[in-house]
Amino acid sequence: MYIPADNSYDLLVSPENPARFLADLQRADQIMLRSTTILSLACILGSCRTTPAPSPPAPQAQAPATPPAEPEAPQESPSETVEAAPTDLLVGGQGGVRLLSPDGELIRTLTKTPAIAPRWRPGRTQLVFLDTEGNLRSLDRDGHESLIAPLPRELPCPADAYDPGGEPNAPLGLNMDEEFWISGDDTHACITLSDAFPNMRLAQRDVAVALADGTVSQQIVFGGSECGVTEYYKSLAGCDRPYAEPPEVTSPISGGVVESFSPDGAWTLVLVGSELADVLHLQYVLVRARDGAVFPMPYEAGPWPKRISLPAEVDSETLLPDVPDMQGGETVAWVGPHHVVLDRVLYVAGERIVELEGELAP
């Protein structure tokens, strides 16, 4: 996504887990190093992960054998599902920041300020987000909103310092969900502002905003050499995010990579295909633990899709035909017992698919 120059709310068509974006696929060799003005995507994706690596769910009691059905809904009663579902499902979009039910229904609007990439602060009593003017703003549960700080979105050098045809896009903006996070000690909002997706960007600023007083620290990562601006590539103070290689987890699909397990242990999210082109494309499916049934994850609202058949073995570095894909760098998060969000779509596994019309606040 990006903050456009004309302040309109256009988002790139291109989500929090170390296994995502090929950490397990060992694809660091696909992105050229800094010397070719392309960030190492593996570095970015690795450094941006804070979610613990997935671990196998606790053993589930086996359901009695039943004839195949298309599809079967989870066994919880409606009251049990509501009690176990998340109480805070907030999304930000052109219509502001809105509180939704676990199934994606609007409860109330907290602010009508157009919001990009909302982020909960630790404790989940306050969140921060970007507006379309390039400002970092704060919002609490009661809808009280305030400005934290404006962000430096200009190019590192004057436009005429860049080669003709090679001028970066301006102003700089947020292009990947994973490049905006709150520090673990809740002191800073850390944001990467750039002109494009990592494998095509020509300019990048890393910014750290002190949440206590709005003080902005920044550094030019690249795009400044054209006019003698010093470039750095290191973490800003307060913005380190440790990363550990995830453990090996056996996938229920041969050749696939386990992304995560549903909180109720009934579903496994598996990466079955990927491709780096203009952006990184990722293909996920959901596997039902009870019987191994595989379900696609389309990007349109509607009823739960029918199960599909995949090849006996997949290549997670190649896209599969007729399997929906999403852009890398976007949000992937379980938000309920069997509720998972990919980018702007909520999947209530075994039941329905809901378009959120905004970005989830993780």
Image (cartoon, rainbow, N blue to C red):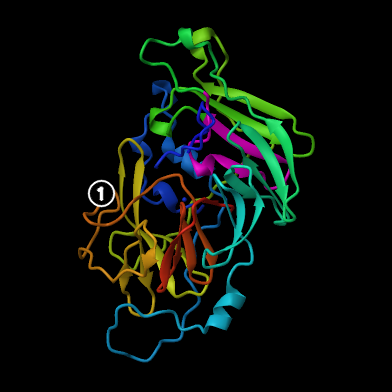
**Region of the chain picked out in magenta, as a range:** 171-193
Mark 1, secondary structure of its residue: loop
Image quarter for residue 115? top right
Closer to the camera, 138 or 100? Answer: 100
Residue name at image x 37 percent, y 92 percent: 64
| Residue 341 image position (x, y, % from top left) | 48, 59
**Residue position marked by numbered label 1 in the rendering:** 318
| Residue 161 image position (x, y, % from top left) | 47, 8
Quarter of the image with the C terminus is: bottom right
| Residue 117 image position (x, y, % from top left) | 56, 44
Can residue 237 be seen by looking at this rendering? no
For badge 1, the amino acid type reads: Thr
Does the segment drawn in magenta span residue 86? no
| Residue 15 image position (x, y, % from top left) | 47, 50
Can residue 301 be seen by looking at this rendering? yes
Q: Is residue 13 above or below residue 164?
A: below
